[in-house]
Each structure stands twice: as structure tokens, then as C-alpha cells.
Amino acid sequence: MNRMDFEFYESEDPIWNPSLLTIPVPGIRRMVNMAAEMDDVIHLSIGQPDLPTPGHITRSVCDSLEAGQTGYTMDAGLPELLDALAEYYGERYGRELSPDNILVTTGATEAIYLALTATSAPDREFIVPDPAFQLYAPLIRMNGGTVHHIPTHAENNHQLDPQEVIDAIGPNTFAIVLNSPSNPTGTVYPRETIEAIVEEAAFRGVEIISDEVYDHLVFDDQPYTSVLSAACDLDNIMVVSSFSKTFSMAGLRVGWMIASQAAIKKLRRYHMFTTTVANTPCQWGGVAALKGDRSFVADMIDEYTKRRDLLVELIDKTPHLTGYRPDGAFYIFPALPEGISGSNVALRLLRETGVCTIPGDTFGESSDNALRISYSLPREQIQEAFDRIIPWMERQDFS
Ligand SMILES: Cc1ncc(COP(=O)(O)O)c(C=O)c1O
């Protein structure tokens, strides 16, 4: 256990289980709470789609409510949704699944919680890219596991070097956590990266936990490689996803986990003791999302691509920010000069310009000098945010 991990378990408060100390004060909440007290704030901080949920999905949720679908479903999920997911994954990734390979959860968040807390234990190490989605490391540490970070950098489009991951595998490595496209970097890992990591992990008996909630949000017709299409079997993989991002259904809270039948059987029981089942009418909404017209997704990708292009251009014009071209999701994670605190810059940007960004240290330990910028807002507002940021940055002397 390194010093950092050890410190997480020291508790001065006798009431709470010390494992709760692994949960940091969320950087996102801190900024958003402060912004709530201010007028005229532009939020480059939002982690959910701004586009409306397609009408056929909301109608299906309402119809199922009116039809009395208000009880519990089966613990693994609504059978119609399990079937629809199996069919959808077969078509999309060529991976034949049976409903027994799937567990429907309360958003991808519950699936991540189940995967990490059911496997993390003392003397088990999890390899996690840094920066990464803020849930992974605390959930691993909560149950005594340790985190081995692999830093990625803006100069390199935040790509993960597969050899670095492979070299980091040691006797205590239990799992590798992947998230492509990534929150907070927008980076999409190419097939070679996914294949190299998945193959080595299978050979060494290491689990892969892959968070693929942004799997549809990939730009410029680039191919997307899911762990599901790179692995020979499901023996050591758990893939997590949800309707939140692809179908603008974040508040409806339906996600899932795909894994071997043995793993799903085990996690079904844990799920029963966690949330019991996911929301029933919203699971019907999920069936409508998978079976209905999906042209909405192409329109959404088109809009996000335009926003990404605008943002890349604006960051390029901004003094002191090093950008890159993210290929997916709706985030970019530009770097400030080395040694400059992203937290200070984000706070001052909010107070002095009314633009809310998220400090890099929310997402890891090697990203203090970064900001997460989300482009889940109309292009006019992105432009207006940078009309404020650029002159502010011009006035700073970060030398
Ligand atoms: C990488 C990543 N995984 C999981 C989630 C949570 O998704 P859900 O709304 O399905 O719980 C998010 C939400 O921001 C995310 O960015």
C-alpha cells in the first residue's frame, strides 16, 4: 500500500466507517455549488447530454407507467430489455450474448460500483489511467484495494501506451480499468491498444473492467473498439454501459453490466442487496431506445463533432492552454503550464469571468495543471465562454 492509499484509511471521525474517507469532496460539486450563487455563469462543467430525450422513449416510459408497470422486475432486469440488449450487442460488436450474460443496473454507476467493490480487497492492485472518471479510485480504495495509476498527457492526445500498462502488471495486479471514449479526456483507444491490453490480461489472468458509456460518441467515422469485440471470451471481462449518454437518458438511471454467466450470477445477488432492481418504467424506455428509430444518435454525433471542432480551434487560440483533438465523448482536458494549479485557475476563471470548468485534480493525481471542459452546450455558448476566457488568459503571467 503506498502512502497515498494509506492516508485514505486514517479516520479521526468515530461515527463513520473509515472507508468513507476514500470518497473525496467532489471537485465538480464544489465548483457547481459556487456557480449556483452567481449570475450569468456559462457551464463548461456539465457531464450529461444537453439534447432532449427522443419522444418515442419518453412516451414509452409514460405508457408503461399508465399500463401499471410499477412493480419490481426480475432481479437481472426486465426480460424484454435483456433480450433487446443481447440482440443489440450481437449486431453492434459481433459478440453473441445470452440474457444470462447481462445484469441491468441503476445507471452505469451501479454497475461500476458492483464491479469494483465486489472485487477490490487488500493486496489487490487495480491499474487505472490517470486522469480517469472520478468514481474508480475511491471505490477501489474503499474495500482496501490499491490503485496503480498510468499517467496520460495532452501532448499525446491522452492516449494510453499499452506497453506501459503491460509493464505495470505485477503479482498483485487484479484488474485493469479502461474507459474509451474517456471522461475526462475524450480519448478513444485504437484497436491495437485494446487488443494488446486484453490479450495480455487474458494471458496473465487479470480482469478487464471496461466502462463504455460513451461508445456511440465517436467522431469522424472512426472505428470504435469495444473490449467485447477484442476479447476471445467473457471469462475475465466486465463491460459496463448505460442509456445515459447515447440516448440522453441520464436521469432515467438505467445501465448494465456484461460479463460471463458465472460473474453475472454472483453480481445478481450483490445487486439484490444494493438496489434490488432498476426502475421498471425506465427499463421499458430502454427497450424503446434499442428497438426504435436511432437516427437521433447520428444527429447527436454530428452536433458534438461541430462543437468539438469549434472548441479545438478556440483552445488553440487561448494563451497558456495546450489542447489536442479528442475523438469522442464530450470533454477535452487541456493542460496549463507545468506547475500551475488547475484548481486556482478554475476558481479564478469562475469568479472573474463567470465560466465554470472543472479542475484537473478531480480526475487523478497527475493532472493538477489541467481543466476539464465539457461541450455539452450550444456552440454559441461555447464561443461566448471563450470570448471571456481568452482575454482573461492573455492577462495572466504564469511564468
Ligand atoms: C465514464 C463514465 N462512466 C459512468 C458514468 C455514469 O453513468 P450513468 O449515468 O449511467 O450512471 C459517467 C457519467 O458521467 C461517466 O462519465
Image: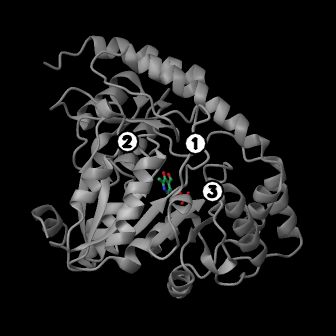
The amino acid type found where label 2 is placed reads: Met
Front residue of 389 and 217: 217
The amino acid type found where label 3 is placed reads: Gly
Q: Disc 1 marks which residue?
A: 223
Query: Which is in the foreground here, disc 1 or disc 2?
Result: 1
Residue located at (51% from left, 18% from top): 384
The answer to whether any part of residue 217 appears in the image is yes
User: In which quadrant is the N terminus drawn?
Assistant: bottom left
Which mark, residue 55?
Answer: none
The answer to whether any part of residue 135 appears in the image is no
Determine the residue located farthest toward the left in the rendered image: 3
Neighbours of disc 3 within 10 Å: few (<14), some (14-19), many (20+) = few
Front residue of 158 and 286: 158
Q: What x and y, as percent, mark residue 243?
A: 65, 57
Q: Disc 2 marks which residue?
A: 31
The amino acid type found where label 1 is placed reads: Pro
Q: Give the spatial CA distance, label 1 vs label 2.
A: 35 Å
